[in-house]
Image: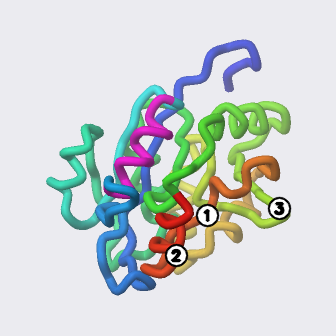
Amino acid sequence: MSSPMEPARITGVILAGGRGQRMGGVDKGLVDFRGRPLAAWAVERFGPQVDELLINANRNARRYAAFGPPVFGDDLEDFPGPLAGLHAALGHAAHPLVATVPCDSPLLPLDLVARLLAGLREHDAEVAVARALGRGQPVFCLCRRELRASLGAYLAGGGRAMERWFAAQRVAWVDFDDCAEGFHNLNTAAELDEAARAG
C-alpha cells in the first residue's frame, strides 16, 4: 500500500457497456448531448484526472475507439451491469487503483478522482465511493485492483448490486454535496432533452 505522500497511479475507466434500456436500447455513450456524444464529455472531463484512460463497451467498439482511449468489453456475457465493467476494468488496468464513471453523466466533477483518493487514504479503504445529498453514487468509485478476485466471486455467485458488494469491503463514502448536479445520469430521452435545454 502506498503512503499518503506517495503519488498514486490511477487507471480511469468510462463504463459504457450497458443495454441503455431506459433510452430505448440505444448505446448511450454515443447519444448526442449539446453537439457531442455523451462519451466525449466523459473523456474530456475524466481523462485529465487519471494516468491511464480506458473505455468499457460491449457494442460499437470501433466508434468508441475513435475517442482515443483503448476499448475493452466485459468478461461476462449478457450485459450483467456496471459491476461486470468494473471487474473487466480491474483486469485491464495498468495501475493499482482504478476509478470508474458512467458514460451518461456529462458534467461529472473535475476533482472527482482527487477527492475519492483523499477519502480512500484517509480511511485506509479498499474502495472509495461518491455520495451526493445523502445518496450513494456507486458507479463513481475508486477501487484497489487487488479486489478483482473478490468481485469475480461475487459475480459468479449471481451478485449484481454494487452497494452490496461494496459493503463487504473496507469502503469510504466521499461526500460531494457541493456539486451534486455533476452526478446526474441522463438515463432517458426526456432527461437528455431537458438537460440539453438547460444548457
Q: Tell me whether circle 1 and circle 2 mark residues in contact (CB < 8 Å).
A: yes
Residue 193 x/y as whole percent: 46, 73
Quadrant location of residue 121?
Answer: top right
Amino acid of disc 2:
Glu
**The residue stretch that appears in magenta:** 37-48
* Callout 1 crowding tier (Cα within 10 Å): few <14, some 14–19, many ≥20: some
Residue 13 x/y as whole percent: 44, 46
Q: CA distance from mark 1 to mark 2?
A: 9 Å
Of residue 132 and residue 138, the one placed in the foreground of this image is: 132
Q: CA distance from mark 1 to mark 3?
A: 12 Å
- Which numbered disc flags the more N-terminal residue, 1 or 2? 1
Amino acid of disc 1:
His
- Callout 2: SS: helix
Side of 126 where 40 appears, left or right: left
The residue most toward the left is 62
Could you say which disc has been placed on residue 184 in the image? 1
Amino acid of disc 3:
Leu
